[in-house]
Amino acid sequence: MLITSHASCGPIVDINVKTGEVRIARMTYKKGHDYPSVRHIMESGKMGQSVLQTLRGGVLKEGAADRKKFSITLLSMDPILVKFGHDQRSPGGTHIKVVYPVFVPEEQLRDIEAEDDDDHDEIHSAITMISAEDLIEETAEGRTVPFHFQATMAVMVWVATEHPMVRPRYSNLLTNWSRPEMTAEQKVALEAYPGMQ
């Protein structure tokens, strides 16, 4: 297996360590006349970019109210979800989607609708922070593509692992979902991919 391309997904997460509440950024994505879907910020990697460079660039580009006054904190140095699929642009290659949770102060998030810089047919709504329960309920009803729902659930499993105080509040959600395990071949390919260095 040869990984030939990547996309980075950056769910924006806010964890209240006192109450155990988790809030996650919500943004709708609409292209042309399609029905809008709820998604996390996601960016396709450019040639020579690492996965983390793509992540930071995507969150800055799609999430910032002001790109000159914007801070992003990576919450996990390891990806919390990696999905493998066929690379449509490189026959025989493998495309990976890599998820890292990030924190951005809410007041720095874009609060207006905006066109995507790379594709002006894509419209992104304002970004709002909502409770994890509300986001999961909304996306479980089919208002997103499956990968973005999986990314949300991976965030919740990661949060419960790293911050045990959230477990009582979200125990029902967490017992009903588990992160897909990578095969040995996928692990080897991921380690060999220059973008993960």
Image (cartoon, grey):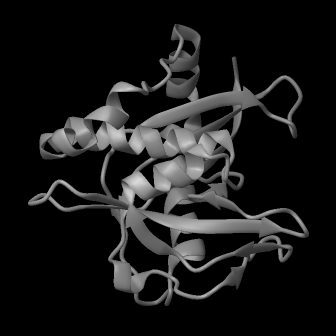
Quarter of the rendering occupied by the N terminus: top right
Task: From the viewer's perspective, tell me whether residue 77 is left or right of residue 124.
Answer: left
In this rendering, position of residue 193 left or right of residue 174: right
Residue 66: x percent and y percent? Answer: 49, 90
Q: Quadrant of residue 173?
A: top left
User: For the point 84% across and 23% down, which residue is it?
Assistant: 92
Residue 157 horizontal/vertical position (percent): 33, 36
The single residue placed furthest to the left in the displayed view is: 18
Direction from residue 51 to residue 28 in the image, left or right: right
Image: 192 above or below 47: above
> In this view of the protein, can residue 102 be seen by the observer?
yes
**Would you place residue 59 above or below residue 159 in this image?**
below
Position of 107 relative to 25 (above/below): below
Q: Nearer the viewer, residue 103 or 7?
A: 103
| Relative side of 152 to 42, left or right | left
Q: Residue at x 50, y 81 (%)?
A: 64
Q: In the figure, 170 relative to 40: above or below?
A: above
Total marks shown come to: 0
Judge by depth and name the residue closer to the eye, 66 or 93: 66
In this view, the residue farthest toward the top is 184
Residue 50 seen from this side: no
- Expressed as whole percent of the image width and height from the top left, the position of residue 97 reads 61, 40
Indicate the position of residue 78 as horizontal and vertical percent values: 36, 39
